[in-house]
Image (spheres, rainbow, N blue to C red):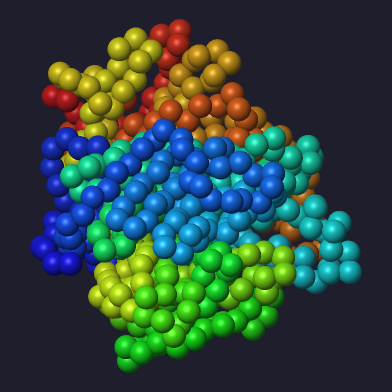
Amino acid sequence: MKARIGLVVLLAGTSVCMAGAASVLDIFPDTGISPVSGSSSCSFEYEASGSTWTEGVHEGQVFLASIKGDGWQMGVGKGGQIYSLRGIFGESVPPQRVASPWNDEVWQSVVTSEKLIAPVQDYQNANRDNWNEIWNKTFPLMYFVHQAGIYTKGAGSDGGAVAAPFYSPCLRKRWNPKTRTLELVNWMQQARTPCVWKSGVLIYTAYRDLGEGCIEVNQVLHNFGTETLTFLNTPWGGVRDSSLPHPVMSNADGSWEAAEGLYGWTDVPTRHLVDTGGWMAWTQDTKKKDSPTLALVFGTDLNDVSNGKRKDEAIRWGNAGNDKVRDYEVAERMSHANVEPGDSWSVRWYLVAGEFSKVRKRAARLSEKAGVSELKFDALVKQPVWINGDKVTTEGKGKPTLELCAFPAKGTVPVFLLKDKRTGKKLITTDAYALAESEPYPNPLPKELEIYDIYDDRRIYRQYAPHIGYENLLGFAFKEKPVDRKVERLTITQTEKLSLDAEAAKLWIPSAK
């Protein structure tokens, strides 16, 4: 693999500046890696992977796309998660659980606010003698945002049962055959749903085939919500133990060692990234050079220039249940980035499939490219939008009806296109929950607890209702009128089937004059 000079350098605080028209999917930082020769293809037509899954889960429900490279095949789910990854080792993704099919035991990003989740977990742990009752009452208070989507069995006044899995809505998708890249943007979901917390997280994901079994995962997390995100699992994932039973961990000196361990409540194997070579792998036989292997490249964090915004960057892993309950070897890269409201962060990692000796070398070469860092965007890049009656599209010909900002620049908010499938009416809005029903959720915590007020006067939301269509991320607009740019109010010709809600009508967009 040969390096090339990129348009964007992955550094904390990097400002991404371009000009002209673009797609919201042009957001990804250039990684500086040119792929080797090879072939790959992508299909959005469902075809079973050929893998065996737990009885009661159905692969067709999660499917969004299938990518085929030299020696591997990846199934990408509706939430942008990797739900299947086949290679010479067979199927590497665990066989799933009925309560969370392709929501938990997949490759994905998971984020939370420790300020909001830690008090709930402390209360649960302090009441283990009454665990079931406490758990059911406090389940909707838990703040965990999953790229994949929500659990099918939750809690709440309606029991929290969801008839079918609800995966994080895909707002845009694009396959680029020249770069061999699948690009997506999804609205991440609160996994514990119904939930008293809204999710304000967009995740952009680009899966690129670099050749030689190397898959680049280039992601951008954008926080458009009101809470600061303080703990990132980027990625969370793992492998099927029955396919790849032997984990190994790289060392900082270039060597590697066996890394057996259990992923449980205590004593989970954990290592700071600076004490590793930036990768770990799972193989069928550590004594054979050609043993079927899959590696995760997470980086060493040696190039951290985040000025103290991150700490304790680490990798944690282990067998979930010692193979008695779940056929799952867990891996999670942990980052304590402070993702403030309005912030965007770049997340990059790699998967490498192939023979043991070759995978180790390729993973080591990619290590310096993996990591987590802050990004900043300018508002010069514009996303055209064409509106004809009630038809709204971000791909068209001729002069567009209006232009939004393509990227989440400072002071901007996302603009969504939603559809009420019962009536066919479409809505342009800044609120992804605009069509979701909600109801009050009584605070289940004792009033004497210091944390009581945090969880008081809350509502639960049903954004997974089947009548809601999440049609598009149209772009971004300014919430307040900027003083240094030519802007105009966001206005459209409203029809019986297309409207602009009150908040969206207050937005400012780049001026067409």
Q: Quadrant of residue 213?
A: bottom left
The image shows residue 342, relative to residue 385, as above or below, that is: below
The residue lying toward the viewer, choosing from 374 and 32, is: 32
Instruction: Name the residue rendered at 41%, 41% in the picture.
Output: 65
The residue lying toward the viewer, choosing from 360 and 159, is: 360
Q: Quadrant of residue 345?
A: bottom left
Q: Give the image location of residue 221, x and y in percent.
A: 39, 54
The residue lying toward the viewer, choosing from 71 and 335, is: 71
Residue 204 visible somewhere in the drawing = yes
Instruction: Name the residue rendered at 76%, 55% in the picture.
Output: 138
The image shows residue 475, relative to residue 182, as above or below, that is: above
Q: Is residue 314 left or right of residue 319?
A: left
The image shows residue 326, relative to residue 283, as above or below, that is: above
Q: Give the image location of residue 361, x and y in percent.
A: 28, 78
Q: Give the image location of residue 47, x and y in percent.
A: 46, 38
Count the marks: 0
Q: Is residue 176 left or right of residue 199?
A: left
Quadrant housing the N terminus: bottom left
Q: Residue furthest bottom?
A: 253
Q: Give the image location of residue 167, x and y in percent.
A: 54, 42
Q: Residue furthest right?
A: 129
Residue 412 visible somewhere in the drawing = no
Q: Is residue 68 left or right of residue 510?
A: right
Quadrant housing the C terminus: top left
Instruction: Name the residue rendered at 18%, 60% in the picture.
Output: 36
Instruction: Name the residue rendered at 38%, 13% in the picture.
Output: 390
Q: Residue furthest left?
A: 5
The image shows residue 139, relative to residue 183, as above or below, that is: below
